[in-house]
Amino acid sequence: MAFQIGIEVDGSRIAWVQNSDNLNSVITKLTTLTADQRTAVIKFHLKTTDKKHLVCTETLNAIPPMEAGTPAIDVVTRLSGRILYYRISLNGRLVSEQKKVLSKYIHRPVPVLRIILIIAIIATAASLIICVPGIIRPSGTEAASEPANKKAPELRSDLHQKQPAAKTEVKITENSGQPAETEASRVTPEPARSIPEKLEVTWSESEIFDKHSVYFTPDSAELTAKTIAELNAFISALPAADDFEEGFFELAVRGHCAKYGTEEGRAELSSDRALNVTTFLRKRWGIEANYITSGAGASEPVSLARDEQHLNRRVDIAIKGSIRKKIASDEER
């Protein structure tokens, strides 16, 4: 049965770092958040197709006081069948090395399902065998149809002989010898239509460029009431459908997060934040545009200060484009 191994640090999102078919060693880098953080709790999870299990928990003590995100915690995982091997290092120093047997979390498929599958295959094959004779017509039917087929050409030939030839009458005038003009042959020429003169069209063009940022709560990609209000205010400043006749827009939506948890978890969280903002803009603004959605993780922080981490939990929106609108002429006015 296939499964995944995930790592969680201090209650952050679980980063699923390794699949059961990957037997190579996988390195996961973790970081701390605050400057005075002295311990870190690391949890290892296992996920199958229907369940998630907590395998074990490791606690790191005596983390040296450094700037937020500076202590380097490296976790190396390796799978060998149903055995998990892992090593945890702090700033390059090995602090834990363990082996965990995963057999009790992984169950083989129930044999009853195999029996049901075999019965279904047999039933399908039987239904096909039963249906085949119905497709083949008896030979008597084919034989009975032969006289009808033989008589068919005779009937067709009789009809062909009895059908009278169509007569064509043409009236000839006495003097000219040409066919007489009939009412249907008289065609009255249509009066020539006047082609309206083309009017020159004048367009007004405008360039669009704006930037905006919205913010999120820790370890969450959900749009809060405050975030929704900020997005609505941003949309109200954008062009509406009746403001232009031709337009092109490109929106770059980039998610960010605080430097906390795993790199995989931060990448996933920042991408989820950007995706939720993009979905909201598409639905509420309703204008066709080219959206470029991405997640930067914690690689582009605004601040590393402990009391300013909320500035990193954000999504940056940048829009650029142009619109064109027709200017009415004096005659149209």
Image (tube, grey):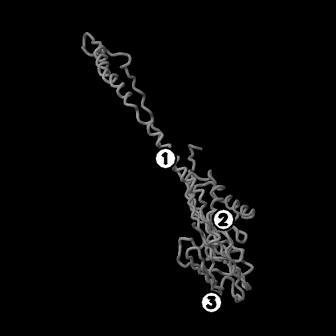
Between the residue at mark 3 and the residue at mark 2, the CA separation in whole angstroms equals: 34 Å
- Residue 189 percent location from the top left of the image: 39, 25
Q: Give, as a three-letter code, the residue at label 2.
A: Lys
Q: Give, as a three-letter code, the residue at label 3.
A: Arg
- Residue 260 percent location from the top left of the image: 68, 77
Question: Which is in the foreground here, disc 3 or disc 1?
Answer: 1
Question: Which is in the foreground here, disc 3 or disc 2?
Answer: 2
145, 301: nearer the viewer:
145
Q: In which quarter of the image is the C terminus?
A: top right
- Residue 318 percent location from the top left of the image: 61, 66
Question: Which is in the foreground here, disc 1 or disc 2?
Answer: 1
> Which quadrant of the figure has residue 5?
bottom right
Kind of element beneath mark 1 = helix
Task: Please report whichever mark, 1 or 2, sits nearer to the chain's N-terminal start.
Answer: 2
Within 10 Å of disc 2 (Cα), the crowding (few <14, some 14-19, many 20+) is few
Between the residue at mark 1 and the residue at mark 2, the CA separation in whole angstroms equals: 35 Å
Q: Mark 2 points at which residue?
A: 51
- x 55%, y 79%: residue: 25
Q: Name the residue under label 3.
A: 93
In this rendering, does residue 66 appear at all?
yes
167, 19: nearer the viewer:
19
268, 144: nearer the viewer:
144
Q: Mark 1 points at which residue?
A: 125
In this rendering, does residue 255 appear at all?
no
Q: Please, is residue 116 above or below residue 54 in the view?
A: above
Q: Quadrant of the N terminus?
A: bottom right
